[in-house]
Image: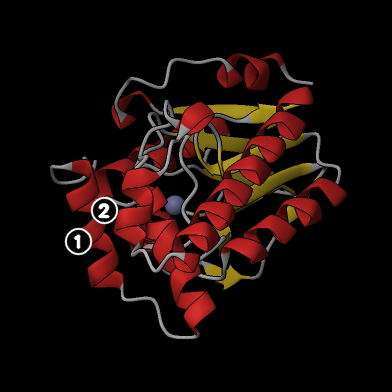
Amino acid sequence: MSTQSDGLAGRDLSVAPDAAQLCELRPGVHAWVQPDGSWWVNNAGAVSGDGETLVIDTCATVQRTHRFLTALGDATRGTPIRWAVNTHQHGDHTYGNSLLPAATVLIGHEQDDRILFAGDLLFAGLTPLVFMGSVTGALTTLDWLAGMTPEVIVPGHGPVLAGGEIDRVLDEHRRYFQFVLSEADRGLARGATPLEIARDARLGEFADWADAERLVLNLHRVHADRAGHELDLVAALCDAVTWLGHPMPTSV
Ligand SMILES: [Zn+2]
């Protein structure tokens, strides 16, 4: 287990993305970890070998992606980037693709050496967001992630996880998704809206996680799935802002 990844796991998340660090998890396997991991502040990574580099996700802005690619170029002594993979299509993970060399080939998912780049299937220490897919699907995904028995996970947002932290964070996600489902179903039974359910809900152990307003978005997701209609993204975001009482803090 690399001491660097262990060190990152306990880091202070209260600093800005300017303090991002490239962390070598294994020889040639790097994670780009941007604090504080909240809205638009994602993780990325790269795998280098045989004189070539595969990039896993980019960043939301030109400046952040440039910083990532510069650090990567330094660490790999300029090994050319041949391929890139996006864990999913959200802008925080893909907008920087335009800064990749023009000849870069975008390919499918990658798992390497028991290091798993999980994308937004995991938000370590932050409130998970389930916009696409479903909350029940997200629960199933946790078993799928655990079944891969990774030694290190680079989550979509938040610090790198290693060893026992992986099970702990998977369990936290499990409890959170079950909490969302049970609150949603109890609320539905009494005809409450997602915003009303969120206002009545007690976040308990999840209250300290950043981006708590995602509860409202996740409840909208369950409501839409249970009712069999599309998620109304604008209504969901408006409700999240109403629940918060002010605009969502973002770092774009
Ligand atoms: Zn993300």
Q: Distance between the residues labelled 1 and 2?
A: 5 Å
Residue at x-position 68% and y-position 56%: 139
In the image, farthest residue toward the front: 190
Q: Position of residue 33 (x, y in %)?
A: 48, 33
User: In which quadrant of the rendered view does residue 138 lie?
Assistant: bottom right
Q: Where is residue 45 in the image (x, y as percent from the top left)?
A: 56, 44
Residue at x-position 41% and y-position 83%: 230
Q: Where is residue 30 in the image (x, y as percent from the top left)?
A: 61, 36
Residue at x-position 46% and y-position 67%: 188
* Residue that mark 2 sits on: 240
Q: Is mark 2 on a helix, strand or loop?
A: helix
Residue at x-position 32% and y-position 20%: 15
Q: What element carries label 1?
A: helix
Residue 120 in the image: above or below residue 71: below
Which amino acid type is marked by label 1? Cys
Question: Within 10 angstroms of label 1, few (less than 14), some, or many (20 or more) residues?
Answer: some
Q: Are marks 1 and 2 in contact (CB under 8 Å)?
A: yes
Numbered circles on residues, count: 2
Residue 72 seen anywhere in this rendered image of the structure:
yes
Ligand 1 within 8 A of label 2's CB? no
Rendered image coloring scheme: secondary structure
Asked whether, in this view, residue 37 is left or right of residue 18, the answer is right
| Quadrant of the snapshot with the N terminus | top right
Please give the label number shown on residue 238: 1
Please give the label number shown on residue 46: none
